[in-house]
Amino acid sequence: MKVWSYAKIIGELEGLSGKALYTLEAAALVHDIACPLCREKYGSTAGPYQEREGAVLARSFLAECGVPQDVVDRVCHLVSRHHTFEGVEGEDWRILLEADFIVNAEESNYSAEQIRRFRDRVFKTASGTMILNALFAID
């Protein structure tokens, strides 16, 4: 729910609305859907495992919830890449990466320098950057 909250806030501040915001929020809600399976199957929730297993689980779940097929397809694309920082296309993917990193940084023991390096390499939205800087008191 934390990733969803940050994704929603960043998405709204960046001007996403309608279907784009709906898709982002759906992806944020299910982005870690594969974590229990990955713990069991691989003994780890490392990003590549989540990306490998997550789309299938998300597709089934979202279809059962009646989510439109085009949204399901995009959400699955995002879930299968939410730890991939290269080749990012689309505001939804960018914002999901940023929101997920903010939560991971809050829950981990990252140094200010690690956060700054990641921000400089991955963050592109003004809103995500502002939130990250404020939360971690970095310049």
Image (spheres, helix red, strand yellow):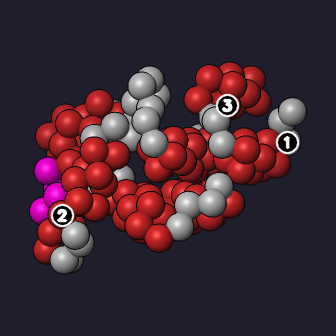
Q: Which of marks 2 and 3 is nearer the N terminus?
A: 2
The kind of residue on which mark 3 rests is Arg
Q: Which of marks 1 and 3 is nearer the N terminus?
A: 3
Question: Label 3 belongs to which residue?
Answer: 119
Q: Is mark 1 on a helix, strand or loop?
A: loop
- The residue under label 2 is which amino acid type? Gln
Q: Name the residue under label 2.
A: 69
Q: What element carries label 2?
A: helix
Looking at the image, can residue 138 be seen?
A: yes
Q: Mark 1 points at which residue?
A: 137
Question: Disc 2 versus disc 1: distance between alpha carbons?
Answer: 41 Å
Could you tell me which residue is drawn at 57 percent across and 43 percent down? Answer: 98
| N-terminal-most mark, 2 or 1 | 2
28 vs 13, nearest the viewer:
13
Q: Could you give the CA–CA distance between mark 2 and mark 3, rounded to whole angstroms?
A: 33 Å
Q: Nearer the viewer, mark 2 or mark 1?
A: 2
Q: What is the spatial separation of the Cα atoms under label 1 and label 3, in whole angstroms?
A: 13 Å
What percent of the width, then of the height, locates residue 114?
Answer: 67, 25
Task: Give left or right: position of 100 versus 80.
Answer: right
